[in-house]
Amino acid sequence: MAKVHVTTTINGEPEEFLCEPHQSMLDALRGPLGLTGSKEGCGTGDCGACSITLDGRLVCSCLMLAVEAEGKKIGTIEGLAQGDHLHPLQQKFLEWGALQCGICTPGVLVAAKALLEKNPDPTETEVRFWLAGNLCRCTGYDKIVRAVLETAADMRRAA
Amino acid sequence: MTETRYLAAQTLDEAIGAYAAAAGAARILAGGTDLLVQMRSGVLRPGLIIDVKKIEEMTAIVPKADGGYWVGAAVSGAVLAEHKGFAATWPGVLEATNLIGSKQVQGRASIGGNLCNASPAADSVPALVAAGAVASIQGPHGRRELAVEHLPAGPGRTHLKPGEVLVGFTFPAHPKGSGDAYLRMIPRTEMDIAVVGLGVNLTLAGGKVTAARVGLGAVAPTVLLVEDAAKALIGSSLDERALDAAAAACRAACKPINDKRGTIEYRTKVAGVLLKRTALIAAERAGRK
């Protein structure tokens, strides 16, 4: 089967990869690109564990074809930390223990970062609605929501 | 197993040519939130995927001189919500569109896709029907216009002819004193499929309804335009009698199924309740004192 050559930008770095035309972006990330931080929970856009940004917009990478990355800017969980320096959301999730098994965590972090870029001062209701597409089956939602709100407050103070 | 090819069409003519040439083996890709799920489940293995998101006409939101709007079929709910002019004019269309799935899904799922997927419970469709949106369709034999309520043919089926592509929607001008609203009933607050969905669009003058349209979803094989409900509202001041009559018209229009989300009796009753609630929200937005 003829593979397609895709030229894209991932976490600010130019990247090239080969994929099948029907392959999802999630499969390309976890396969040829070796970026296994994005997880496959459902593969049907219900769980949000594969959340990435596409030209800055939050999407499920399982519902996007890898070939659609051509010429676009992709953001994944691997792009949150700057070297050893964790993103404030990651730091807060660690401090507050806002994760249990961790499978949903990369998707939650990518989604929460997208929220805070759009809305630096969300209400608890806004955080809960925004993260409604990120399922946590350990049901640790309360700590997740609190960690996001607290990070938002920290980032506003630092700004 | 046949090979799948991918084409990012640069023009509408290129997309329509390739779609017609593939003779049924091709699928249109806008947001992909239905298509990729069908491909993954093995229901569908298209020979050709035609991505229409590089076609300007299909991704544009254009205010028209008469106060109406053109909205490309491939525009996502998230992009539409960020258009301040559209958001101010059609809040009901947006509240319907942005009830579809999660933020992740709203960033991709298109309005045209929601209509063409032809789910009886599609959230955006009752609001589009209430708005009086007209679908613009192009195929190998030219262009035609079709009111949104005439496009779905049944669950998963549309009246698009072979080779035809939904290009976008024309929203009519919204006269002063108009407002629209959409409500859906689901057992939880987010991420679920409508038990009933109902859109109302009305215009008020001097406290009386001068124009009204009611779109009703998830209670029949296709989303319905309930003309009898609109008739009951027009000429009234949305008093209890008019609302009762419109609610009765909505209940009478229901031909629902029993399923895990709701029984026939429940869906029918809720359709009437939603009519009253939605009409009052639309009236408030229309500036009713």
Image (spheres, rainbow, N blue to C red):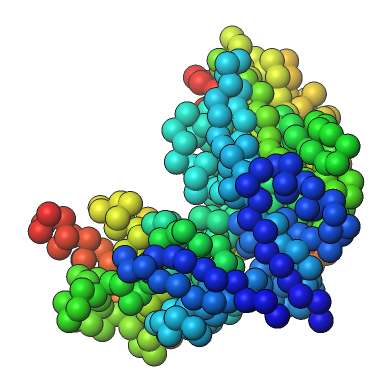
Which residue is at a point 60% across and 27% down the rendered structure image? B69
| Residue B266 position in % (x across, y down) | 76, 57
Above or below B66: residue B147:
below
Please name whichever residue, B140 or B32, is drawn nearer the observer in this view of the structure: B140
Does any portion of residue A71 appear in the rendered image?
Answer: yes
In which quarter of the view is residue A36 placed? bottom left
Extreme residue toward the top, this view: B206
Would residue B254 be found to the left or right of residue A134 on screen?
right
Q: Which of A26 and B153 lies nearest the eye of the viewer?
A: A26
Lateral position of residue A39 relative to residue B169, left or right: left
Q: Quadrant of residue B157?
A: bottom right
Residue sticking out furthest to the left = A158
Which residue is painted at 25% across and 63% down in the image?
Answer: A149
The spot of residue B267 in percent (x, y) is 76, 54
Q: In which quarter of the image is the N terminus of chain B?
A: bottom right
- Residue A106, compared with residue B236, is above or below; it is below
Name the residue at 70% across, 42% down.
B12
Would you place residue A105 above or below residue B140 in this image? below
Q: Return the x and y of residue B39 as percentages of the image width and height.
A: 72, 72
Residue at image point 10% right, 59% down? A158
The answer to whether A123 appears left or right of B149 in the picture is: left
Between residue B278 and residue B136, name the one nearer to us: B136
* Residue A96 screen position, x and y as percent: 22, 80
Residues A64 and A154: in front is A64
Number of marks: 0
Visible in this render: residue A63?
no
